Image: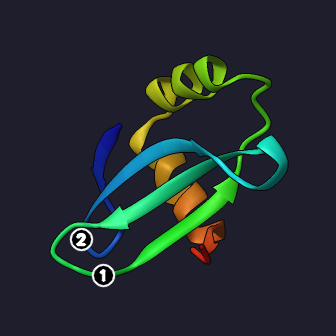
Amino acid sequence: MRTFRDSDGREWEAATTFGSYGALRLIFSRRNGDELRCCDMQAGTLRDAEQELAAFTDTALREHLQSAVPWQA
């Protein structure tokens, strides 16, 4: 899991998880809020996805957040 701030200074947490049919997803949850967003990852395994998340810069996380869609369980 990673914590970062968006361009408006709000704090978010990013984590990896499995989506439908085993797809890997990047999940964003806003701290002190109820917003959840997600986007697909291209990694082949959860371990690869976690390593990719660890390597992202805060700028890359902000870019992924901007392209993320609202989470639907």
Q: Where residue 27 sits in the image (x, y, percent)?
A: 51, 56
Looking at the image, which residue is at 54% across and 19% down?
51
Q: Residue at x 67, y 59 (%)?
A: 39
Q: Which mark is residue 70?
A: none
- Locate residue 68: give its quadrant: bottom right
Which is nearer the N-term, disc 1 or disc 2? Answer: 2
Judged left or right of residue 42, residue 30 is left
Depth order, front residue of 73/16 = 73
Are there few (<14), some (14-19), or many (20+) residues within 10 Å of tag 2? few
Scheme of image coloration: rainbow
**Tag 2 residue:** 10
Give the image location of residue 73, x and y in percent: 60, 73
Q: In the rendering, which numbered label is found on residue 34?
A: 1
Dot 1 alpha-carbon crowd within 10 angstroms: few under 14, some 14 to 19, many 20 or more: few
Q: Residue at x 51, y 32 (%)?
A: 53
Q: Measuring 49% from the left and 49% from the top, which residue is drawn there?
A: 61
State which quadrant residue 18 falls in: top right
Q: Secondary structure at mark 2?
A: loop
Q: In this rendering, which labeled residue sits more in front, label 1 or label 2?
A: 1
Image coords of residue 49 (percent x, y)? 62, 28
Q: Amino acid at mark 1?
A: Asp
Please state which amino acid type lies under the numbered disc 2.
Answer: Arg
* Whether residue 71 is situated above or below residue 4 in the rendered picture: below
Compared to residue 33, the image places residue 63 above or below, namely above
Q: Quadrant of the N terminus?
A: top left
